[in-house]
Amino acid sequence: MQNNRDSKNNQRGPQEPKEFDEKVVQVSRVSKKTKGGNKMGFSVLMVVGDKKGRVGVGLGKAKDVLSAIKKGVKKAKRKMLTVPINGTTIPFSIEIKLGSAKILLKPAPRGSGIIAGGPIRSVVDAAGIRDISSKIKGTSNKASNVYATFEALRQIGEMVEHKGIKLKSVAQVEEAERMKLKELDQKAAPSQESMKKEEIKQGAKVEKKPKAKKTEKKADVKVEEKPAGEKKEEVKE
């Protein structure tokens, strides 16, 4: 049996990478009353994106989960949206209210990551935004927040087209950061050289120790004292 399975897998060949990233946001069980009784089904909210500026949202309904996922993916691909990305983040902040959902999206500096909850994170990550900060101010319903995030990104795209805002690519942002780093290095270089010169001067001062003064040792001269009773002999010629 294993050999048959291996041969089938070899015939299929290696799986090709998917063009779109598919994410399941919410799975709900739905029942519908009919004359014959209650009909059970599932509704699945899907987010589809290529992580290059395109994202879509779709809700699929079917009797089983797999077919509902397929329907949701098809609907999301039909309603794809092109998201304006300035480097790795959005060009400006926006606050939107859609129904009971109220969210705030703000640009973030490069390297900060995605600071967002589950519903917003799924849409933003699928769109290819790497740095963003957000806040959910309204309901905690996942579907409402997903649709509100999608609407916020759509409005950002319309405003960018209307005002003619120029967006920077990731390569341009990286080049600007490199130039800033070079300028900082050039400013820091003379200060480092002066510090090194001061360290060398201090080391030279420590090496030059003061010379010790030579102390002259005086010879101990002993004076012989003669007794008082002795008289000096006079030499007569």
Image: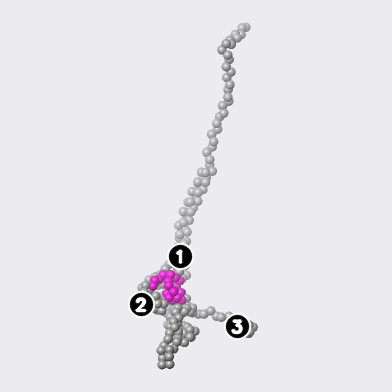
Give the residue at mark 1: 177
Magenta-colored stretch includes residue 191: no
Mark 3 or mark 1: name the one nearer the start of the chain.
Answer: 3
Classed neighbour count for the residue bearing mark 3: other residues with Cα under 10 Å, few (<14), some (14–19), many (≥20): few
Which residue is at the front of the view, 123 or 66? 66
Classed neighbour count for the residue bearing mark 2: other residues with Cα under 10 Å, few (<14), some (14–19), many (≥20): few
**Front disc: 3 or 1:** 3
Q: Quadrant of the image for the N terminus?
A: bottom right
Amino acid type at mark 1: Glu
Does residue 53 appear in this view?
A: no
Element assignment for label 1: helix
Does residue 9 appear in this view?
A: yes
Q: Quadrant of the image for the C terminus?
A: top right
Which residue is at the front of the view, 158 or 34? 34
Element assignment for label 3: helix
- Residue 227: give x, y in percent of width and height: 58, 14
- Give residue 223's quadrant in the image: top right
Kindly identify which numbered label has been placed on residue 100. Answer: 2
Which residue reaches farthest right? 3
Which residue is at the front of the view, 55 or 199? 55
